[in-house]
Image (spheres, rainbow, N blue to C red):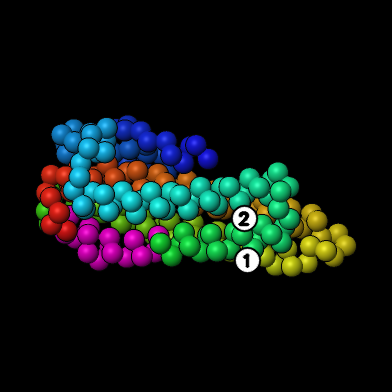
Amino acid sequence: MGAIWTERRIRLSTDPDTRDGWPTELLFLLDRHPRATWPARRKAAVAFWLEVHDHLRRDCVGLEMAADDYAARRTSPAQFAAIAAPRLRGLIAGLHGHHQIEDFHYFPAFRRAEPRLAPGFDRLESEHAAITHDVNGALAALAELRTAAEHASEPGAAATVALAAERYIAAARELCRSLCRHLTDEETLVVPLLIERGDDY
């Protein structure tokens, strides 16, 4: 769970499958406004953006806590399925709304405000489609888990339920891994821009 919250600034590849940060040429605003200085910033736009992201991260932590309880046998398969469903759907609802307003309002405005960052916002927008793929994978795994849990009392069902739970946990973790990496990368571009340009968005 702690890995979800790891924040690092590393300037490496822009390949979405291997990168661990942004290339140097996109970090000129971060150089002026490093992450360590953000808590001292009181701009409403900065506070709003970080709170939305922190809420999504907390939702991911909630998914991980439910998985931990199941793994420790503190919850039954049926209980795990019942707990996982609203938590996953709550994360997805918040994520969908955030991505919609980014794609149709914020990212176009940011590109106009600072054209040098346009390649970064292009990549962030393209990642939304990849995250949607992970969302669909997690939803499909959740459906499989719920179906298996409904038949958990039947003879020989334990192995099927266990496999469905493992698949769901893996899918939810992959979603949160890619999402949290995306959120950190997004903050690296967006927050310094908001600090620099004020609350005009």
Where residue 166 appears, x then y in whole percent?
Answer: 67, 51
Q: Which amino acid type is marked by label 1?
A: Ala
The residue singled out by tag 1 in the image is 143
Magenta residues (range): 95-110
Which element is circle 1 on? Answer: helix
Residue at image x 22%, y 58%?
A: 107
Q: Check the picture and name the quadrant holding the C terminus.
A: bottom left
Residue at image x 27%, y 32%?
A: 36
| Neighbours of disc 1 within 10 Å: few (<14), some (14-19), many (20+) | some
Residue at image x 50%, y 37%?
A: 2
CB within 8 Å, label 2 to label 1: no
* 134 w.r.t. 143: above or below: above
Identify the mark at residue 168; answer none if there is no mark: 2
Residue at image x 46%, y 41%?
A: 4
Where residue 184 appears, x then y in whole percent?
Answer: 35, 43
Which element is circle 2 on? Answer: helix
Where residue 145 appears, x then y in whole percent?
Answer: 67, 61
Q: Which amino acid type is marked by label 2?
A: Tyr
Identify the mark at residue 79; answer none if there is no mark: none
Query: Is residue 137 visible in this depiction of the protein?
Result: no
Left or right of residue 41, residue 12 in this image: right
Left or right of residue 144, residue 56 in this image: left
| Neighbours of disc 2 within 10 Å: few (<14), some (14-19), many (20+) | many
- Does the segment drawn in magenta span residue 99? yes
